[in-house]
Amino acid sequence: MKIAVMGSGGVGGYFGARLAQSGCEVSFIARGAHLAAMKEHGLKIESRLGDIHLPSVRVTDDPRTLDPVDLVLFSVKLWDTEAAARSLAPLVGPDTGIVSFQNGVQKDDILKRLCGEKAVMGGVGYIATAIARPGVIRHTGTMQRLLFGEYDGRRSARAEAFLAACRRAGIDAELSADIRREVWEKFVFLVGLSGTTATMRLPIGPIRENPRTRAFLFDLMQEAVAVGRAHGVALAEDYAEKRLAFCDGLPPDMTSSLHHDLERGNPLEVEWLSGGVVHLGQQVGVPTPANRAVWDILALHAAGRMRG
């Protein structure tokens, strides 16, 4: 299977490396120091599931140097979605699938608008990874789960082929008959985790123990559920309660990538997380005061650390 990884950071680099190791023809699209390191030394994965070193990888910063592929794994940061999507044309043939494993629920609308509805499949990734240093990705824990599928629920040939490739690579993968719901279910949890840990600058442990911050965590998720249901997503009415119970079982030191990005002075995805809940709520008349508060609190940090 020919695969292009658009955005070869923690998520894209990890899954791309696993697929390449198992025999897929994988091309990585990266930039900056990570690109330079991959060109010189290849790509390394540090993982409790087994380290990987691909000493030589096909890597570029220009998709125009590549031929059409069977599948594009799309995993750039949300603020880069539109620009990256516009650069995909050389990779996309008549049967190419594009699967985004980004956060948020508006990502695929952008991809469909720019790349065509036929090309876009839905995807959700559950994994904790980060670039440890240029050319090296560190996998924390053992979870490496992918859910994906066609938006019309069909078990298409390209979806089945990717499922088989994932399983050969030892990736925990599943085809979903309702990928829209799966994308929203992750979104609900992520809105709560990211919104609380970033605004409070603390991990989940103390947040879930304090009655007031626990209530705020619940409100963030409940608003996302209400917005999703108003948009016709098949979310259970009590889904926020179930996610709150799930949060009780998380490691107390767990935090979010939004919190990490805030502490590092990086641009934030809040516009597409709590900000996304606000935007989508406005479309259907659902009030979202808790998510509005998160969005407003982080407004001065959204573009990254202010200089000067």
Image (cartoon, grey):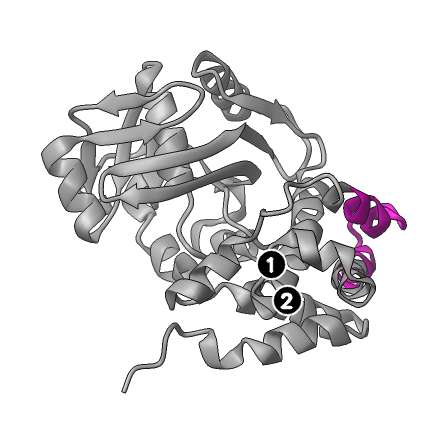
- Cα–Cα gap, marks 2 and 1: 9 Å
Q: Horizontal and vertical percent for residue 226? A: 82, 60
- In this view of the protein, which residue sits in the foreground, 20 or 292? 292
Point 69% across, 57% down: residue: 206
Rendered location of residue 288, percent (x, y):
76, 72
Q: Which residue is drawn at 83% across and 63% down?
A: 211
The answer to whether residue 94 shows anywhere in this view is no
Residue at the outermost left position: 40
- The residue carrying mark 1 is 194
Dividing the picture into quadrants, the one containing residue 122 is top right
Label 2 packing within 10 angstroms: few (<14), some (14-19), many (20+): many
Q: Is 36 on the left-hand or right-hand side of 183? A: left
| Residue 165 placement (x, y as % from top left) | 45, 17
Residue under label 2, please give it.
Answer: 274
Give the position of the C terminus as an image quadrant: bottom left
Q: Is residue 98 above or below residue 160?
A: below
Q: Which amino acid does label 2 sit on?
A: Ser
Q: In this view, does 204 lie to the left or right of 229?
A: left
Residue 246: image location, x then y, percent:
76, 41
Q: What stretch is highlighted in magenta?
A: 223-245
Mark 2 or mark 1: name the one nearer the start of the chain: 1
- Relative to 150, say whether 184 is above or below: below
Give the SS element for disc 2: helix
